[in-house]
Image: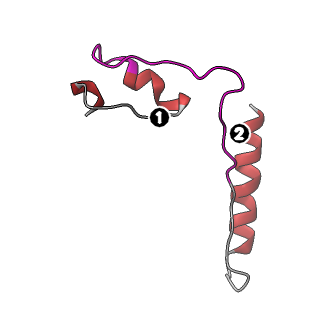
Amino acid sequence: MVANGYGVTLVPEIASQTKARNKRVSLKRFAAPEPGRTIGLVWRRTSPRRRDFEALGQAVKQALRG
């Protein structure tokens, strides 16, 4: 809808290259301070996959460090 001139949307930076390919879409950055988000990982205390979730959490942390 945005490409057809019917509004605006927020696009995560990771997806911005894909959206930039469309000549009808104009990308603008927020002024400083740019908004952000916090990502969390939760699971049920009774889940038998606790080690799997902890490993996933560590993998995400490492990926975010670059």
Give the crowd class for mark 2: few <14, some 14-19, many >=20 residues within 10 Å: few
Q: Pick whichever, 38 or 30, lies toward us.
A: 30
- Disc 2 or disc 1, which is closer to the eye? 1
Q: Pick whichever, 61 or 37, lies toward us.
A: 37
* Residue under numbered circle 2: 63
| Residue segment shown in magenta | 20-39
| Residue type beneath disc 2 | Ala
Q: Pick whichever, 64 or 8, lies toward us.
A: 8
**Pointer 2 with pointer 1, Cβ within 8 A:** no
Count of numbered badges drawn on the protein = 2
Q: Please tell me whether residue 8 is drawn above or below residue 63 in the rendered image.
A: above
Residue located 25% across and 31% down the image: 6
**CA distance for labels 2 and 1:** 23 Å
SS under mark 2:
helix
Q: Main secondary structure of the magenta part?
A: loop
Q: Please tell me whether residue 18 is drawn above or below residue 39 in the rendered image.
A: above
Residue located 68% across and 82% down the image: 48
Q: Please state, as top left, top right, bottom left or bottom right, where the N terminus lies in the image.
A: top left
Per the image, is 33 magenta?
yes
Per the image, is 30 magenta?
yes
Q: Quadrant of residue 36?
A: top right
* Residue under numbered circle 1: 10
Residue located 26% across and 25% down the image: 3
Q: Please tell me whether residue 48 is drawn above or below residue 56 in the rendered image.
A: below
* Whole-percent x, y for residue 21 in the image: 34, 17
* Whole-percent x, y for residue 14 in the image: 53, 30
Sequence-first disc among 2 and 1: 1
Give the crowd class for mark 1: few <14, some 14-19, many >=20 residues within 10 Å: few
Residue located 74% across and 31% down the image: 66
